[in-house]
Amino acid sequence: MARDEIKVFGPATVSNVGPGFDLLGFALEAPGDELIIRRNGTDKLVLYNQSDCKLPTDPELNVAAVAAASLLRELHSYEGFDLVFTKKIHPGSGVGSSAASCVAAVVGLNELLGSPYETAELIPYAMEGEKVASGSTHADNIAPALMGGITLIRSYDPLDIKHIPYPDDLWCTVIHPFLEILTSESRKLIPQTVALETALKQCGNLAGLVAGLTTGDYPLIGRSVNDSFAEPHRTHHLPDFAALKESALEAGSVGTGLSGSGPSVFSLCRGEEMASAVGEVIKAHFTDRGIDSRIYTSRISQAGCKII
């Protein structure tokens, strides 16, 4: 008998990861979205917001509904569903709020409709929702939120996504200062062309980061978590960002940078204890400048989106 209701968890994600603009991302164990999806006996998507975030309930403006509608069209399904947000990552926080909603919607619908697609095949439909939030189609949050782990988008046309191995004791701390930065606005700050020297530096860092993760070479990871492309144009809203990175490094961070388009800051660390200590140092940096913040300390989640 077909199920009529399902509850799904979509994890937060860190994207870009230094030099991996639009190409590299990983999933966190927490925080995340919780979304209930249920058949409603109509031919419409109806949205209910029971979270503590302000969300659009117009299906054409809500990223999860756009992703869901994309999947339903592809399946030639005319069923209606309620999408009920019970927990929500705050939009604009830099940890993949829109991606978490999109993947939860398509994973839940796919399950209710008899699992016509494998998990990885859902990426294009989730990306349709992500495009509403950012103004462009990118998968560096979507892919890890769906598939878990660290993912590399080698190509968008055709879509070619690979998991990157990483050390077992790699942890991440994410500090979310209570500032809201819209991805669509932040992307406008990035120049459309870059100098050859910048491009070569970025390519070298991305290759070095992948090599460091794959071989467990922490010094190489640390040398490579540097973004010469997007980050220099996105940190004006974070006071004394260079000093923040230096403080994190002195506290034991392997490497620190903007999570996605910001304002959240991620720091890769070796082990939970170090990640917690580095998180406190970065939080203190914001506190000293009159900015409240929240810390998330997590392993990289291998599970990705899951049915609760």
Image: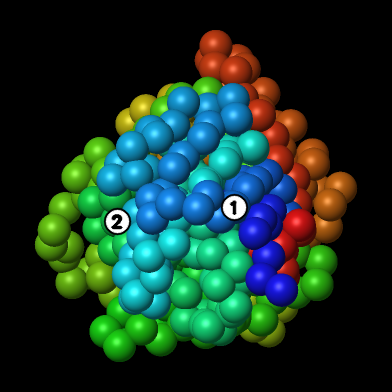
Front position in the image: 207 or 291? 291
Which residue is denoted by mark 1 in the rendering?
Answer: 38
Instruction: Give the residue drawn at x 71%, y 48%.
Output: 30
Image disc number at residue 306: none
x and y percent of residue 215 in the render? Answer: 68, 84
Q: Is residue 214 visible?
A: yes
x and y percent of residue 88 in the render? Answer: 58, 38
Q: Residue type at mark 1? A: Arg
Question: Under tag 2, what secondary structure?
Answer: helix
x and y percent of residue 211 in the render? Answer: 57, 82
Give the left or right position of residue 282, taking residue 187 as reference: right
Determine crowd level at label 2: few under 14, some 14-19, many 20+ residues with C-alpha closer than 10 A: some
Determine crowd level at label 1: few under 14, some 14-19, many 20+ residues with C-alpha closer than 10 A: many
Q: Which tag, 2 or 1, sits closer to the chain's start?
A: 1
x and y percent of residue 158 in the render? Answer: 30, 88
**Residue furthest toward the left?**
193
Give the left or right position of residue 79, taking residue 218 as reference: left
Q: How is the image coloured?
A: rainbow
Front position in the image: 2 or 232? 2
Instruction: Give the residue drawn at x 70%, y 41%.
Output: 296
**Residue furthest toward the right?**
273
Q: Quadrant of the N terminus?
A: bottom right
Which residue is denoted by mark 2 in the rendering?
Answer: 131
Instruction: Please name which of the two marks, 2 or 1, marks the residue nearer to the observer.
Output: 1
Q: CA distance from mark 2 to mark 1?
A: 24 Å
Front position in the image: 53 or 4? 4
Instruction: Give the residue drawn at x 86%, y 48%.
Output: 273
Residue 139 found in image quarter: bottom left
Query: Is the C-beta separation of discs 2 and 1 under 8 Å?
Result: no
Residue 118 found in image quarter: bottom right
Up-down: is 176 above or below 107?
A: above
Q: Residue type at mark 2? A: Lys
